[in-house]
Image: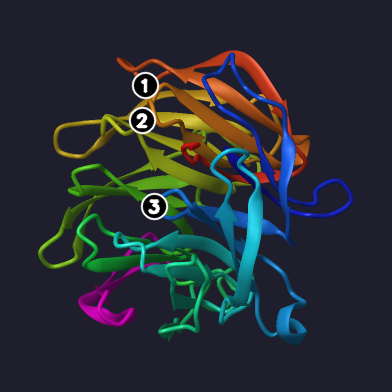
């Protein structure tokens, strides 16, 4: 398990621990020193790891960066390979296409997307595509311009979908793996409620439904997805926090369980994970909301067996492990709490 962090007085980069189940967790170690690796992604082979560097000093403050690392299959240690400009400011999300040939990045502050070719040695090349979002939302403070927060490929690798917090849109692009380019789809986007601020989304394993977490409104919106045309059909919107919640709304991460039966989302506003059950038509039903046993839950991940959920609590410096009831989706604290400085992103990689 690799842990991305915000670096500073206590954190130095990407951390590592061995995972063999909730009661068999190895000690935490620094895997690689790098600045603000706030989101991580592994390649399909599990030999390489990629991190955005959410920094303001790269290239004189004009860009963030993306770093590539090779993974030592025996020790899990990371060897730095190279770093390229993210072609925008404050990169916040990184992923790979299904062929593993390209790395895609979302840059929050500049509202840009970028695609980078990946060599067989794992190193990143110069961008093959750069897309600049334009426009703004109704919130003059948070949505004064575009803020790309996620880009992800559909399971068939035909479409790249981007959530833009500043525009209240899911933008859809046709992805061309032959040359690593993006082409606006028709229709080019799906809309969310004005001022909601979409942050992250997740598809069901069969690709028929997608669930979008809105950071500013703390809501989850269910969409049907037509994979032949790349179009979304809005089904419903539910709150991720209690209806009587009066605090600051700041939802963070969302994931669909590998079974395709449950949706999980983290709330930094009330430090919780909310659980929904997925119905036959993709609509959601509330199951429960559980405290994360920490402060400011950000990223979380479901382990490869689907039996555990691990959540990174940024401001309490810990990663907390919950057991998942595979029948109901409910979460039960295991008692395993790992001490990690300012954790924000989690990524499993199978060891050699």
Query: For this view, does 33 lie left or right of residue 64?
Result: right
Residue underneath mark 2: 276
Residue 100 in the image: above or below residue 182: above
Q: CA distance from mark 1 to mark 2?
A: 8 Å
Q: CA distance from mark 2 to mark 3?
A: 14 Å
x and y percentages locating residue 287 in the rendered image: 38, 23
Asked if the magenta segment contains residue 182, the reply would be yes
Residue underneath mark 1: 329
Q: Which mark is residue 48?
A: none
Query: For this view, does 84 lie left or right of residue 186?
Result: right
Depth check, mark 2 against mark 3: the one in front is 3
Question: SS class of the residue under badge 3?
Answer: strand
x and y percentages locating residue 271 in the rendered image: 63, 34
Question: SS class of the residue under badge 2?
Answer: strand
Question: SS class of the residue under badge 1?
Answer: loop
Residue underneath mark 3: 201
Residue at the extreme left of the image, as rendered: 228
x and y percentages locating residue 204 in the rendered image: 26, 43
x and y percentages locating residue 289 in the rendered image: 49, 25
Q: Is residue 216 visible?
A: no
């Amino acid at each position: 398990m690799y842990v991305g962090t915000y670096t500073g007085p206590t954190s130095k980069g990407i951390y590592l621990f061995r995972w063999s189940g909730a009661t068999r967790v190895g000690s935490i170690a620094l895997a690689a020193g790098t600045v603000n690796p706030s989101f991580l992604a592994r390649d399909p082979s599990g030999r390489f790891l990629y991190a955005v560097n959410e920094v303001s000093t790269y290239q004189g403050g004009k860009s963030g960066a993306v770093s590539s690392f090779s993974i030592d299959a025996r020790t899990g240690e990371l060897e730095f390979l190279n770093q390229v400009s993210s072609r925008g400011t404050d990169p916040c999300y990184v992923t790979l296409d299904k062929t593993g040939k390209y790395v895609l990045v979302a840059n929050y502050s500049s509202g840009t997307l970028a695609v980078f070719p990946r060599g067989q040695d794992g190193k990143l090349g110069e961008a093959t595509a750069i897309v600049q979002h334009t426009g703004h939302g109704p919130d003059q403070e948070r949505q004064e311009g575009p803020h790309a927060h996620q880009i992800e490929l559909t399971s068939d690798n035909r479409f790249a979908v981007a959530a833009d917090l500043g525009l209240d849109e899911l933008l859809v692009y046709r992805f061309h793996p032959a040359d690593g380019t993006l082409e606006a789809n028709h229709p080019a986007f799906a809309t969310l409620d004005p001022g909601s601020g979409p942050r992250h989304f997740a598809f069901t394993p069969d690709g028929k439904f997608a669930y979008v977490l809105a950071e500013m409104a703390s809501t989850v919106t269910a969409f049907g997805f037509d994979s032949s045309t790349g179009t979304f059909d809005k089904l419903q919107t539910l709150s991720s926090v209690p209806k009587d919640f009066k605090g600051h709304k700041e939802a963070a991460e969302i994931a669909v369980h590998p079974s395709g039966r449950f949706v999980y989302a983290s709330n930094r506003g009330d430090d919780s994970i909310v659980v929904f059950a997925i119905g036959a038509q993709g609509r959601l039903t509330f199951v429960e909301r559980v405290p994360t046993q920490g402060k400011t839950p950000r990223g979380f991940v479901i382990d490869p067996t689907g039996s555990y959920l691990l959540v990174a609590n940024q401001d309490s410096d810990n990663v907390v492990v919950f057991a998942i009831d595979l029948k109901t989706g409910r979460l039960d604290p295991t008692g395993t709490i790992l001490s990690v400085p300012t954790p924000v992103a989690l990524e499993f990689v199978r060891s050699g």
